Image (spheres, grey):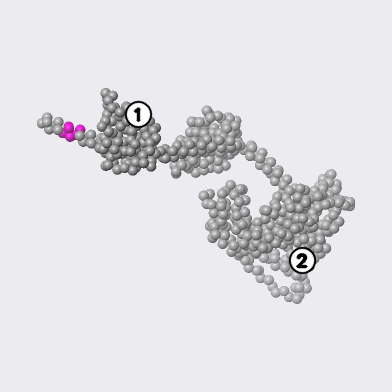
Amino acid sequence: MATKNNFQALKTKIQSLKEANRKKDVIIDSTHDGMIAVDADYQVEIFNRAAEEILQLDRHDIIGKDVRKVIPNTRLHIVIQSGRAELNSFQRVDDINIITNRVPVKDEDGEIIGAVAVFRDKTEVQKLAEEITNLKEIKVMLEAIINSTQDAISVVDEEGKGILINPAYTKLTGLTEEDVLGQPADVDIAEGKSMHYQVLQTKEPVKGVRMKVGPQKKDVIVDVAPIMVDGELKGSVGVIHDVSEIKQLTKELDQARRMIRQLKARYSFADIVGESATMRAAINKAQKASATPATVLLRGESGTGKELFAHAIHNESPRKERKFIRVNCSSLSDSLLESELFGYVEGAFTGAKKEGKKGLFEEADGGTIFLDEIGKISDNLQVKLLRVLQEKEIVRVGDTRPVKIDVRVICATNINLERSVQEGDFREDLYYRLNVFPITIPPLRERKEDMEALINHIIRKFNQEYGRAVKGITEEALTELKRYNWPGNVRELENIIGQGMIHMDLQEEMIAKHPLPLLKEDKIELPEVKPISSTSLEDHSLKEIIEETEKKLIIKALEKTDDNRTEAAKRLGIAVRSLYYKMDKYGID
């Protein structure tokens, strides 16, 4: 019975040894490093899979053989003989350079019973070393970038513990690394909730959140985004903006914009996009006009870019360093427009300043004045403007003394001045004074070959304004836009592209057809108009009949669009500004 038990115990022990050897072999074969082990007689006992791949040898040809005969340039026998380890040694085996560690193996009594070599391909080691060096350089560079930026930055790990802040953060909040690193993400919050925790929970970025931070309760706006590495959340990064600084910068920017708007021309010919024959002809003519002091009349539909041309002409003229003043003649009443253009003296009218006021013509002395929608000024103003062009002088409201001025006049209109002259709405002598250097700017429907370049220009502009990174427009969307008639011209195109970019998903890079607002060329049905009899012609002028018909069309358009004035203007094929003007003219509420 005892013998049977001993046999069973021996069998179990043998199985355990086999299992241990099997596990040892699996572990040895799993390592990425090559491994060779020999006994005291230089016989190879271990030759793992990595050694096979590196040395291009089959273990069946190696195991049990004298290592000196089967491994070129081996030094394992020398390690056994000397009893000294050889660390980080370079060795060439055929065409392979390896780096190896060779150590003697000793028993419990200190006797050498073999040797082991662990090695790997030198090129792989060099590659790893280069990668580590690159990573270190990238880390140093990133730290330098983060520390040099003027934006305050806060980074937490996936548990919401602070792991990085920059000097700008300390300057803004008053908190140091000792106060923040390793602490919960809300350690810097004085009022509000930490957006780090929200982002870590939702894995979605947040923008423009107002809160107060630090001991001084600084009013800030924060943007926070998750840090994702191979699809795994590793933490979040927050950028903190000082609201007081933003307010000051906004104030300064608004002041600068107002100054530029009033006194400077912002655009040059480089800002005018268009390579079509009609557009190039207009640009070339405008460039010629820039070199002369002649009055320029810019003609074209609303939204074609007449003001852009006015800026460019001034900026390329000898007057470019002087003032450029813009006036929309249809935006002011006649009396107000007159006082704004020509100024007034003390007591000229009720509410006039005691000291009087210089007009815009005097303000523009030596520079350029741009009169937009010139075709809509009153007869009285037409007479005064004619005097400016003929005599180079103005008379302030309430005064009789002329004031000499040196002003270059650029005018713009979207109406047919010749027809207005024939109908008696515009002075013929003023027409000839204005029409010295006429430039007609083509509508968008007549230069659709420029649309792609225009769209790309508009995308670049809105990328800066909206903080987007849209790269362009798809062919399908471009084809769809080219089919449209564009009654609002470039201004309408800019509106459509802007709306399309707003409705795009953040990850989209190209404007497709689906986010673009629906383009319609719906026509308004003409209201029933009674035939014009000879009697009605006697009672009403052609102008009155045309105006009555136009009024009915506008009312019909407003009814069909539920008083949506933007849509009504689009269906009528006119600009919204023109619609408001006509509604005011006809007394339509």
In the displayed orientation, state which residue is furthest to the right: 401
The residue drawn where x is 56% and y is 52% is: 471
User: Which is more toward the observer, 355 or 406?
Assistant: 406
Quadrant for the N terminus, please: top left
Judged by its main secondary structure, the magenta piece is: helix
210 and 233: which one is in front?
A: 233
Residue 438 appears in the picture as rendered: yes
Residue 269 in the image: x percent, y percent? 69, 54
Magenta extent: 8-13
Which of disc 2 and disc 1 is earlier in sequence? 1
- Where on the picture, by quarter, is residue 88? top left
Q: Is residue 125 left or right of residue 524?
A: left
Label placed on residue 418: 2
Residue 298 x %, y %: 74, 59
- In the visual, does 406 lie left or right of 589? right
Regarding mark 1 in the picture, which secondary structure is present there? loop
Q: Note whether 382 is above or below 252 in the view shown.
A: below
Q: Residues within 10 Å of mark 2 (few under 14, many from 20)?
A: few
